[in-house]
Image (cartoon, coloured by chain):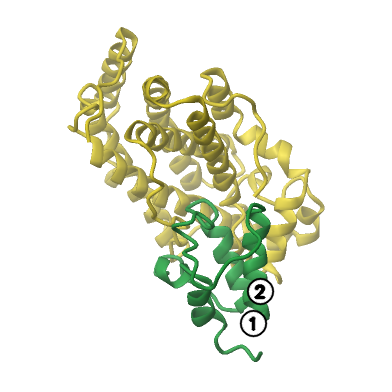
Chain colours: A yellow, B green
Amino acid sequence: MAVAALPVTDRFHEVLDRLSSKSIEDYYNPYLRFDWPDRLDENRMWMSPDLLTPYGTPHFDELGEETLIRLSKWESINFYSLNVHGIRELLLEVVARIHMPGFEVPSDFFHHFIGEENEHMWFFAEFCRRYGDKIYSSTAMRAGAGWEPEVENFLVFARVLFFEELVDHYNSRMARDDSLCDTIRQVNRIHHQDESRHIAFGRELVSLLFTRMCEVVDESRRAEVEAYLKRYVVYSINSLYNPHVYRDAGVPDPLALRNALLADERRRPIERTVIRKPLSFFRKTGIFTDDALPTV
Amino acid sequence: MSEGLEQVKQWILKRHPERTDIAPDTDLIDNRLIDSLSFVEFVFLLEQLSGRSIDMDTLEVDEIRTLAAIEEQFFKAEVH
């Protein structure tokens, strides 16, 4: 399939040069970087309480402290599992595009990106297997959506960017939370540091791909793309409310809790805080024409 | 049609108001009645209605491609 080159700008070249240099300067060996204790304390929180899915609703108090501590363990394992699967899927997409027509300019940075993401996937998987003895299942269904190549290219990197920004909210919060143990803070801090480069790159690339897409599709197709991406935003948020996690935490009716929390309007402003930055980016660039989100 | 499968059908119809019915052999994926974003909600619903745990890592799309396949896979043992 013939895809025209990106409408690259001087700014894009400058950003790529700066980020590539930073990737080289900040390079570290993840396999030596972490101290992995044999076990983590099961009697303290593994995740900041305000990041837990029942936070802000009566369910938070009703679950009781012991269940909340168990929930913080399994919600953190779910969070790192989502990272593992999210990275696995984005690597497939980036590897499919590196050194292919249309991506000549960012291909060099893609090498840093792929290398760093592989290492992130390793330390998140390591955390899950060491301390949770499992990685939660992927919730992805692989099925072709039939988009034009320019739309598909835009959507792939828009999804990657949104996912990275969503995760980064959690990483930066937990890296700063001194009530959490050192291992948890370290995993989140290191990921947050690396992701700042990937987010800066992603914002530039997504803007260019959006410009490119708008040159070849009409208004009605753009509206379909916006509707799809908004559903993706809601889908990503909802993946945090995992009934398998609630079951592991000892909640008697896990799916009922998920449904109750998804239906609880008190959760919406909290979710908006989590996605404030990517939503603002999508609005500013015109990718979203308003900030209304669908209900699933 | 079992009660569980009827609830599955109603769940899909509620999300696609342009449709009034779904034939047992309608391809739910090709017709975009279930897509990659609604897939997970759908699997949780199937778990709840069938009372069976579903491993999403090993679930084949063909197992949920039509209402007939879903009945065969998840509701066959149910007493009508």
Q: Residue at x 68, y 57 (%)?
A: B14
Q: Residue at x 67, y 46 (%)?
A: A295
Above or below, comparing residue A190 to residue B11 in the picture: above
Q: Residue at x 66, y 90 (%)?
A: B80
Q: How far separated are the C-alphas under marks 1 and 2?
A: 6 Å
Q: Identify the amino acid type marked 2.
A: Glu
Q: Quadrant of residue A12?
A: top left
Check disc 1 and report its element: helix, strand or loop: loop
Same-chain status of marks 1 and 2: yes
Q: Residues within 10 Å of mark 1 (few under 14, many from 20)?
A: some
Q: Position of residue A96 (x, y in %)?
A: 24, 41
Q: Position of residue A189 (x, y in %)?
A: 46, 36
Q: Position of residue A112 (x, y in %)?
A: 25, 32
Q: Residue at x 78, y 43 (%)?
A: A266
Residue placed under numbered mark 2 in the picture: B6
Give the camera-side residue of A228 and B17: B17
Above or below, comparing residue A131 to residue A1 in the picture: below
Above or below, comparing residue B14 to residue B75 in the picture: above
> Chain under label 2?
B
C-beta proximity under 8 Å, tags 1 and 2: yes
Q: Which mark is on residue B2?
A: 1
> In this rendering, does residue A79 appear at all?
yes
The quadrant of the picture occupied by the N terminus of chain B is bottom right
Q: Residues within 10 Å of mark 2 (few under 14, many from 20)?
A: few
Residue located farthest toward the left when viewing the structure as drawn: A99
Q: Which mark is on residue A160?
A: none
Q: Identify the amino acid type marked 1.
A: Ser
Give the camera-side residue of B80 and A248: B80
In the picture, measured across the screen, residue A179 lies left or right of residue A164, that is right
In the picture, measured across the screen, residue B69 lies left or right of residue A279, that is left
Residue located farthest toward the top when viewing the structure as drawn: A10
